[in-house]
Image: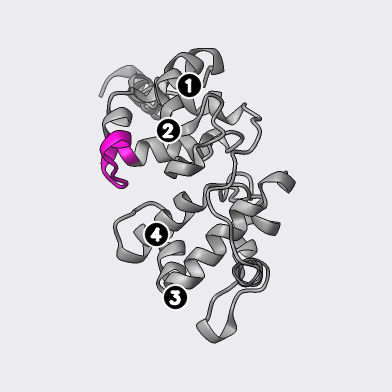
Amino acid sequence: MNTLARSNPIAVLLVLALPCAGLAADPPVGDAARGATIAATCQGCHGAHGEGVAATGGPRLAGQTADYLGAQLRNYADGRRTNPIMSAMAKGLDAQKQVDVATFFAAQSAPYAARSVEPTPEQLARGRTLTRVGDESKQLQACANCHGPDGTGERYATPYLAGQSAAYVASAIKEWKTGARHGGEAQMRPVAQRLDDQDIAAVSAYFESLGDNAH
């Protein structure tokens, strides 16, 4: 054993640990200006400022948290979510670009897109009940328990749904119901499986109707 090891074994351990320091790189910091350039390719589906395209089911991205949006891009890139357009796009973005474009959309505050559906009063009433109260007969808790009052979202936890495209919300619920969507399925799949088609249509239409009053 050399002199250093005999005199101060703790020092030896610290020296040996030094090459490992810094191996875990800090996560990239998003830049909205760089993200704006990338976002130009997203306008056809998500609108110029992330307001969404309700008629085609393109979801609203404006004002969602960068953490949530970045996580969805990673899910598309690694196959936990699948979509012919989004999967290809996400796989073409490195980690820095994913964070940049997520930061851009998170910073947007765009007007809400026109509604894609005109719900009946009965649908709105059912959607309001599911959102605010739930349905004990189906063992459904209120959507608000996770997504905030009337779908306004819980920062760092769940996305806002108020003003989101009804077509998109319905599609997402059905993907969780069939097991096609991963990422959040532990929470959402049990809920989705208890919703029939009428309930899905009702809650989706209700959330979309809240756009003008959201946030």
Choose between 57 and 85: the one closer to the eye: 57
Residue 83, compared with residue 210, is above or below; it is: above
The residue that mark 1 highlights is 100
Circle 2 or circle 3, nearest the eye? 2
State the separation of the CA atoms marked 4 and 1.
26 Å
Q: Bounds of the magenta span?
A: 76-87
Q: Residue at x 58, y 73 (%)?
A: 141
Q: Which residue is mark 3?
A: 194
Q: CA distance from mark 2 to mark 3?
A: 30 Å
Residue 185 in picture, x, y percent from top left = 39, 59
Q: Quadrant of the C terminus?
A: top right
Horizontal placement of 175 versus 37: left or right?
left
Check residue 17 in the rendering and tell me which mark sits there, or answer none: none
Q: Secondary structure at mark 4?
A: helix
Question: Label 2 crowding class (10 Å Cα cut-off): few <14, some 14-19, many 20+?
Answer: some
Query: Where does label 2 land, which residue?
Result: 45
Which comes sooner in the sequence, label 2 or label 3? 2
The residue under label 4 is 185
Q: Who is closer to the viewer here, 11 or 28? A: 28
Amino acid under label 1?
Answer: Asp
Q: Cβ–Cβ below 8 Å for labels 2 and 3?
A: no
| Residue 131, percent from left and from top | 63, 66
Question: Who comes first in sequence, dot 1 or dot 2?
Answer: 2
The residue sitting at 56% across, 58% down in the picture is 205
In the rendered image, the vertical position of residue 86 relative to residue 97, given as above or below: below
Q: Quadrant of residue 6?
A: top left
- Which amino acid type corresponds to the residue marked 3 in the rendered image? Arg
Q: Earlier in the sequence, mark 4 or mark 1?
A: 1
One can see residue 77 in this view: no
Which image quarter is the N terminus in? Answer: top left
Few, some or many residues within 10 Å of mark 4 (<14, 14–19, 20+): some
Work out which residue is located at the far bottom of the displayed protein and give it: 137
